[in-house]
Image (cartoon, rainbow, N blue to C red):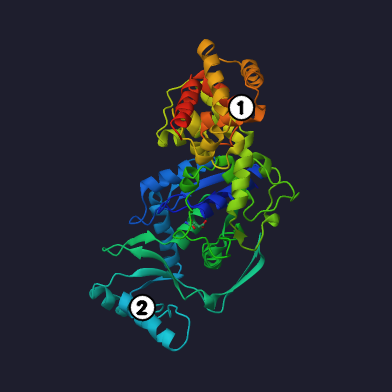
Amino acid sequence: MTVRVRIAPSPTGNLHIGTARTAVFNWLYARCHGGKFILRIEDTDQTRSRPEYTEDIKAGLTWLGLDWDEQLRFQSQRLHLYRETTQTLLDKGLAYRCYCTEEELNQMREAQKARGEAPRYDNRHRNLTPEQQAAFEAEGRRPVIRFKIEDNRDIIWHDQVRGKLFWKGSDLGGDMVIARTSPEGDIGQPLYNLAVVVDDMDMQITHVIRGEDHIANTAKQILLYEALGSSLPKFAHTPLILNMQGQKLSKRENVTAISDFQEMGFVPEAMANYMMLLGWTPPDSTEEIFTLSQAAEKFSLDRVSKAGARFDWAKLDWLNSQYIHQMPANRLVELLIPYWQAAGYDLDVDRAWLEEVAALIASSLTRLSDAVEQAKSFLVKSVEISEEGISQLQQPGSTEALEAIVDALETQPRLSEADAQQLVKQVTKEKNVKKGLVMRSLRAALTGELRGHDLMQSWLLLNQHGWDKPRLQQALRLVSSGG
Ligand code: GLU
């Protein structure tokens, strides 16, 4: 048996972290078993579906490194299949037309509530006579198609994550709507539970791996598989993603779209790695850093947890920094350029030089967006000197040392690392000051701050662009004018 799994997002919003995590698990499962991973767009709800969301979903999956097999499927192109299946169920007497109006359904629910019962459809149109049906039709009522769900049915399945699951037919809300009808009375738009079963059967899906919010749907879908004479796929329900307070991660209060994480400066490898760990524990739980293909060798559903997975920003940040710190400078620079551009920095500079800047600041980055601040002194011509920086420049001996460096730069504007080291040594000796003072003053004048990246490397990068001398001069002017 070839493993075939799928994700079936609705294009009614940007790619959500929950869907992306489900995609990661499905992808890992497929790749682990040499199977197929299918992407199916559930766009039957034409009022809420938008092509730009389909594009966002595809772009987000691709960004994360998740590729899919076979052609992309769109439910909207498969409506004839859902119609045929609905007709089959009607023909077998397993489905029927229900003519209840919205108002009648509301009244039904109100009455149930008043009696302290859970709201459900009471199956009142299950056995209409042809005359009753004709009368409703004559009134111009537009029916829906309902699938019969017997109250006395027990639905039991073995979930690959949660073990044995049990659902009573009487807890499924009564006969369920599987399709709407058109104004002409034809079978029209299918509803999720029908469409998903038709598709999973047609695409020979072997394992349905999806969020645990679909467990009740699974019970309904199992009844549809049976009614259609099909064997069942295996089901695996993954835990919900919770915030650190243990509540469901909601769209409103949190960032939940993959594109938001991307914008915030997370790298795709870290995001994919973090999502693997949202609910799955690797066999050696001390190992946490994996690429997708490394994880695919180890992935199994029995190591997916039943408990909700808490979204831990600190952990994600840590993973992100690990990936950034190990990244080759040419790739890092590629990822940083958009942030620098957005900050308005002038990037009309030599590429190799930019890579050196990236390599220098890499170890200070947690998110790519941190590079705006961290690279500022290299990419913006003049720096503002902090108060601390000014008091450093006012230290006895500081001005003399910096003036001597400026003089040296007049005669030798470009420095090698050895030249720079030699120059500091020479100034220390000539002006009879401590090396630490020279270094701190240099840093204050060149970067405006007392702390930062490796000073010699920073100086050399600025020196290559001839930005060191003007900064030293500017600092000297500032101190002589009284700060
Ligand atoms: N459109 C559904 C969702 O995104 C699909 C659920 C399923 O995998 O069956 O939640």
- The spot of residue 289 in percent (x, y) is 67, 43
- The spot of residue 265 in percent (x, y) is 51, 42
State which mark lies toward you, 2 or 1.
Answer: 1
Left or right: 19, with 51 as reference point: right
Q: Is mark 1 within 8 Å of ligand 1?
A: no
Above or below residue 160? Residue 151 is below
- Mark 2, residue position: 105
Q: Nearer the viewer, residue 74 or 338?
A: 338
Left or right: 207, with 138 as reference point: right
Q: Is mark 2 within 8 Å of ligand 1?
A: no
- The spot of residue 467 in percent (x, y) is 48, 22
Q: Nearer the viewer, residue 56 or 202?
A: 56
In the image, which disc is placed on residue 13? Answer: none
For the residue marked with disc 1, what is the amino acid? Val
Q: How many marks?
A: 2
Residue appearing at x 40%, y 71% in the figure: 96
SS at mark 2? helix
Left or right: 93, with 281 as reference point: left
Above or below residue 5? Residue 404 is above
- The spot of residue 342 in percent (x, y) is 41, 36
Quarter where residue 140 is shown: bottom left
Asked whether residue 137 appears in the rendered view, the answer is yes
Name the residue at the bottom extreme: 115
SS at mark 1? helix
